[in-house]
Amino acid sequence: MKNIIFIAAPAAGKGTVSKKLVDEYGYLHISTGDLLREVIATGSELGIEIDRIISSGNLVPDDLIFRLIEERIQADDAKNGYILDGFPRNIRQAMGYEEILKRLNKELGIVIELDVPKSILRDRVVGRMLCRECSSIHNILTGEFTPIKEGICNNCGGELYKRGDDNEESFNARYATYLEKTKPLIDYYQDKGCLYKVTGTKAPEVLKSVEVLLND
Ligand code: AMP
């Protein structure tokens, strides 16, 4: 299976599409945001520092991200193909990643840009609620999986919570960071001939377009 890199603004649906690809094709999903939140959850000094950076909408230092990625893609469960969600986030990370791949004798695969209008992204972020038990994503603004009972997961009855960075101010900062740092990656990968663009706001149609690319 081809490795996949998703390039997309916050809440464009990388996580949702990735989950489907994991369930249906057996991909490993590697989200640098999730890896960082695992470090935060340990309560270590490093975790506290990462939490501060993430909450401000800025990017965590590249070298820490390289360490997390290099370790994760070498694990046994990454052998059959993996999805990078949230990495690389800037040109320096893209170049560092190529060095890691060369060292490990691995292929880049394909890069998929998910293109979603800003106003939809804003509502997805500001209205997003996650389940503490099963991690399923709900939304109180967009009509996409609205909680039937306030604060309670539709799937398993677990408690819903908001991520620390899912608010208007942080969204604006993250979106600005995306435009400034991550969007240039689109030209970078286009020049390398491995970029594909998928437009759409509904998960099933986005998934279908991605599947076409994977089976090409
Ligand atoms: P995400 O879950 O992908 O939206 O990531 C949440 C936050 O984690 C981002 O706003 C960044 O602060 C940080 N983060 C995630 N991935 C990276 C990365 N590749 N480089 C630097 N910071 C990252």
Image: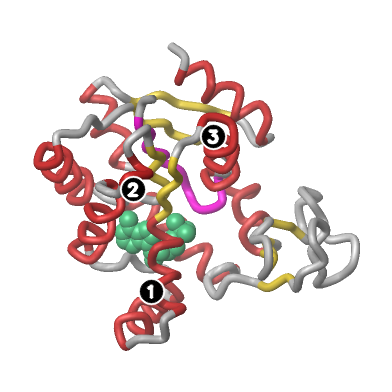
Amino acid, disc 2: Thr
Amino acid, disc 3: Leu
Q: Which residue is mark 1?
A: 39
Question: What's the residue at 52%, 44% (across, down)?
Answer: 14
Which residue lies most toward the right here? 149
Query: Is tag 1's residue or tag 2's residue first in the polypeptide sequence?
Result: 1
Q: Which residue is mark 2?
A: 182
Mark whose residue sits in front, 3 or 2:
3
Query: Is tag 1's residue or tag 3's residue first in the polypeptide sequence?
Result: 3
Spatial CA distance of label 3 from label 2 is 23 Å
Ligand 1's image quarter is bottom left
Spatial CA distance of label 1 from label 3 is 25 Å
- The 10 Å Cα crowd at callout 1, few under 14, some 14 to 19, many 20 or more, is some
Q: Secondary structure at mark 3?
A: helix
Q: Position of residue 99 (x, y in %)?
A: 11, 43
Question: What's the residue at 79%, 64% (across, down)?
Answer: 153
Which residue lies most toward the front here? 76
- Placement of the C terminus among the 4 image quadrants: top left
Q: Secondary structure at mark 2?
A: helix
Dot 1 beta carbon under 8 Å from ligand 1: no
* Camera-side residue of 184 and 8: 8
User: In the shown orientation, is residue 199 left or right of residue 9?
Assistant: right
Residue span colored magenta: 3-12
In the rendered image, residue 88 lying in the magenta stretch gets the answer no
What label sits on residue 21 in the rendered view?
3
User: In the shown orientation, is residue 65 left or right of residue 30?
Assistant: left
- The 10 Å Cα crowd at callout 2, few under 14, some 14 to 19, many 20 or more, is many
Amino acid, disc 1: Val
